[in-house]
Amino acid sequence: MVVLTSKQAKDKFGVLMDTALREPVTITKHNRPAVVVISSERYTELEALEDRLWIAKAEEAEKEGFLSVKESEAFIQEILNAEA
């Protein structure tokens, strides 16, 4: 992974963007990693992976007896109606 200081990233923004299209670029501030710049394509892939992970976790939770979305909504509505 390429590592740039924040000053290098600012001074060579075009290079940063070109590099990030090929591989992640870590930008450091005060000698510590601060951010990672990735391509839009890679970001979309990571978002899709995260979505699949949360769906799997939700399905597992429902199998273990947690409330489904519909059951949760009904429960919340019941509480709100009781307070009214």
Image (tube, rainbow, N blue to C red):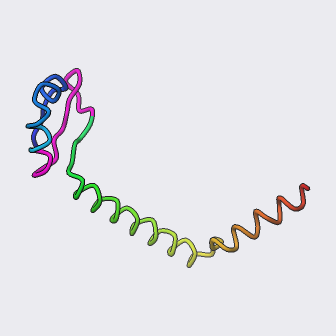
Instruction: Identify the image quadrant of the C terminus.
Output: bottom right
Residue 79 within the magenta-colored segment of the rendering: no
Q: Is residue 32 magenta?
A: yes
Outermost residue toward the front in this view: 14
Report the number of numbered marks: 0
When the figure is inspected, residue 67 is found, relative to residue 50, above or below; the finding is below
Q: Quadrant of residue 19?
A: top left
> As drawn, which residue projects farthest toward the bottom?
63
- Is residue 84 found left or right of 11 in the rendered image? right
Residue at image coords 76%, 67%? 75
Q: Residue at x 17, y 26 (%)?
A: 10
Check the picture and name the quadrant holding the N terminus.
top left
Residue 77: percent from the left, percent from the top? 79, 64
Camera-nearest residue between 12 and 81:
12
Residue occupying image coordinates x 51% and y 75%: 59
Q: Position of residue 47 (x, y in %)?
A: 34, 59
x, y percentage for residue 46?
30, 59
**Image position of 18 (left or right of 72):** left
In the displayed structure, does residue 3 sit left or right of residue 70? left
**68 lies above or below 11:** below
Question: Toward the viewer: 12 or 25?
Answer: 12
In the image, residue 53 above or below residue 83: below
Quadrant of the rendered structure where residue 9 is? Answer: top left
Q: Quadrant of residue 63?
A: bottom right
Region of the chain picked out in magenta, as a range: 19-34
Residue 73, percent from left and from top: 71, 67
